[in-house]
Image (spheres, rainbow, N blue to C red):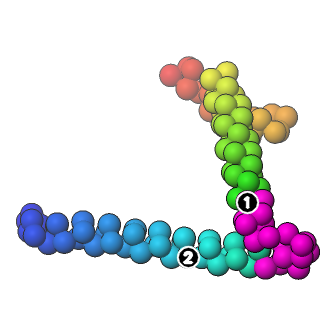
Amino acid sequence: MQPHPVSESISKKNSHRHSLVKMIKLLIAGFLIAGLIILAAQDLAPNMSYANLFAYLFWGLAVLAVSLVGVSVIYLTIYQWILRKGGTDTAWFWFSSEPKGLMALRESLRRD
């Protein structure tokens, strides 16, 4: 039985609406957290204007985001290299040997 086209279009509209609502909630939460940080920073630096504090907060978060993306790219590149060089799993890079039984399993697969 195929779904009714109208009910399918309604469910698609609802899924977009839900993602929009989640995005709005996320933005509001972000602004509230930024406001709390600004209030705390105003106590630490009372002679600095709110505009400067917002600018420092924005640039700090931007540097943090760029750093996290850079570290992620570096780690993913290393993991890809490990897999291309024949690594079983990227987590085994940190251990001195293969998992127990893997060598016997490879030998049995080579014989077959």
Q: Main secondary structure of the magenta part?
A: helix
Q: Pointers 2 and 1 in contact (CB under 8 A)?
A: no
Q: Nearer the viewer, mark 2 or mark 1?
A: 1
Residue 18 in the image: x percent, y percent?
A: 37, 73
Which mark, residue 55?
A: 1
Element under disc 1 = helix
| Residue 92 lies within the magenta run | no
Q: Which residues are magenta?
A: 39-57
Can residue 27 be seen in the rendering of this structure? yes
- 86 displayed left or right of 39: left
Which mark, residue 16?
A: none
Residue 87 in the image: x percent, y percent?
A: 68, 29
| Residue 50 lies within the magenta run | yes
Residue at 32% in and 66% down: 16
Q: Nearer the viewer, residue 88 or 6?
A: 6
Q: Nearer the viewer, residue 97 or 14?
A: 14
Q: Is residue 90 above or below residue 63?
A: above
Can residue 103 be seen in the rendering of this structure? no
**In the rendered structure, which amino acid carries the disc numbered 2?**
Ile
Mark 2 crowd level (few <14, some 14–19, many ≥20, 10 Å Cα): few
Residue at 74% in and 79% down: 36
Q: Quarter of the image containing the N terminus?
A: bottom left
The residue tagged 2 is 28
**In the rendered structure, which amino acid carries the disc numbered 1?**
Ala
Q: Nearer the viewer, residue 102 or 23?
A: 23
